[in-house]
Amino acid sequence: MKWMPRGLAFIVGAASLIQEILWVRLAGFATGGLPEVFGIVLGLYLIGVAAGAYFGRRLCVTDMCAVRRSAVIVLCVSVVFDFTVLFIFVRAIGVMPVVVALMPLVFIGAALKSVLFPVAHHLGSNDALQWKGGSFSKVYFSNVIGCTLGPLVVTVWAMDVLPIEQLFLLTAGMTLVAASWVARRWLVFPIAVIFAAGALAIAPLLPRLMVNVATVTGGIEPSWLVERKEGVVHTVPDSQGDFVYGGNAYDGRINIDLRRNSNKIDRVYAAMAAVVAPRRVLVVGMSGGSWTRVISSFQSVETIDVVEINPAYKQLVARYSEVAPILVDPRINIHIADGRRWLRSHVDNHYDVIVVNSTFHWRSGATMLLSREFFELLEGHLNEGGLALVNTTGSPEVLKTADAVFEHAYLFGNSVMMSRKDYRPTLRSGTASIFATRFDGVAAFNANRVEDQRAIAAVVNAPLLAIGEVELRSGRSAEINTDKRMLTEYKYGEQLR
């Protein structure tokens, strides 16, 4: 009997921690990446663990047979809950805030599994006093190993090959195996085989959970969606250029037409025109590839390094003929890596232009690309006269932070352009460089077309606002954002919804 409690502790520990990770992913996706979500899920999970363990203690006051029967019942209830919770969550977020819908589900899921923690230790403890500590430690060790290996396997491998609904189904299967082991050891193998066969049959029939959540929270069903451990990417069709979403937050559009400018692509044209004959360019955050495609159209460009953390964007880019050429352009090197880490490990790389396609300033982790420390890192990778462009997404703190690092930092549209050199005269005279752009050898603009003249004139003559003007408009003094303060995420971030 000694192996049953250890196996129970291992399986339940693995399933429980896997579900915590899945809830963090699901809740973060549903809220668009609010930073508070992780803390809320973790808090609910720990409260659920405490409540479940307290209830489990009360099951351990009868004989061993009764304890085992109670354990089997709790595990079977947990299996049913694991399977139905997805349907409940999707329906709930349609009528109530995400966090409100989340709270009871995370709590109940954690509580059901933590009931088995004291039960496993009770069943696995030796009655002899001199052996009780040793037997207890072996059960606890098995639980810790399960809590470690489960999340490790899921985050390193399973999230790349299985959608989240199937991962929830996996935890239900693990819990069912644990129930069969507690009931009778000989049941484990046939139950596991039956569940595996059933899972293969039912998996294609399960609703696409992320698709449903994206539809409920965004109001439109995605036309394409892919899940990876690095995040979830999906698109929504639109006549002005399909919308691209990363982690259920707007991440750009598929559009390279300055005349249309549905994705504010004028910012990229401005950054390139503000530097005389830029040769080396760095793009941090490829997204749908529109920025990179436009940069490649400038005739002076010799090398473009693109750093993108999520390889799913390469799949996305390949779907659109407008941007797909960046995947085969010999001048473009796409690196799947964290942008900040990549810059730190390539200290000798210097660029004439760096564009950072950063996400909304309030999202979890956004500070990593919007802090003073990051802007100082960018400055160290710019050539003399080089320029960096970073999306502010409406945060005065981003411009204030850039102004603290660079002598010349101005707001262009909703992005900040920063440099050690005054780039305004170069931008104002940049009409010719934009007219000279070509896609696949074909001129992007016609100098005799009034529409083209107006579109380019709007770029080179666009207002550039200094921090004082932005503070006056916002009605408050902006603050400098740092890695430790994280003002854009917390103090001036979005509210829970």
Image: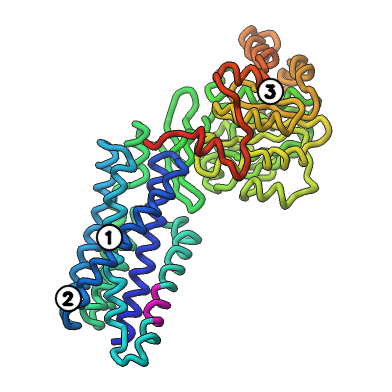
Q: With 93 as the anchor, is 251 left or right in this view? A: right
- Which of the labelled discs sits on residue 201, or is there none? 1
Quarter holding residue 449: top right
Callout 3 amino acid = Tyr
- The residues colored magenta run 137-143
The CA distance from mark 1 to mark 2 is 30 Å
Callout 1 amino acid = Ala
Q: Secondary structure at mark 3?
A: strand
Q: Residue at 24% x, 63% y: name it.
A: 79
- Which of the labelled discs sits on residue 69, or is there none? 2
Q: Secondary structure at mark 1?
A: helix
* Quarter containing the C terminus: top left
Q: Nearest the camera: 53 or 92?
A: 53
Asked if 375 appears above or below 474 in the picture, the reply is below
Residue 167 appears anywhere in the view: no
Q: Which of the marked residues, 3 or 1, is nearer the chain's N terminus?
A: 1
Label 3 neighbourhood size at 10 Å, few (<14), some (14-19), many (20+)?
many
Q: Are marks 1 and 2 in contact (CB under 8 Å)?
A: no
- Which of the labelled discs sits on residue 223, or is there none? none
* Quarter containing the N terminus: bottom left
The furthest residue to the right: 384
Q: Nearest the camera: 292 or 374?
A: 374
Q: Is residue 197 magenta?
A: no
Nearer mark to the viewer, of 3 and 1 = 3
Asked if 260 appears above or below 185 in the picture, the reply is above
- Which of the labelled discs sits on residue 410, or is there none? 3
Counting the numbered discs, the total is: 3
Q: Which of the marked residues, 3 or 2, is nearer the chain's N terminus?
A: 2
Quarter holding residue 300: top right
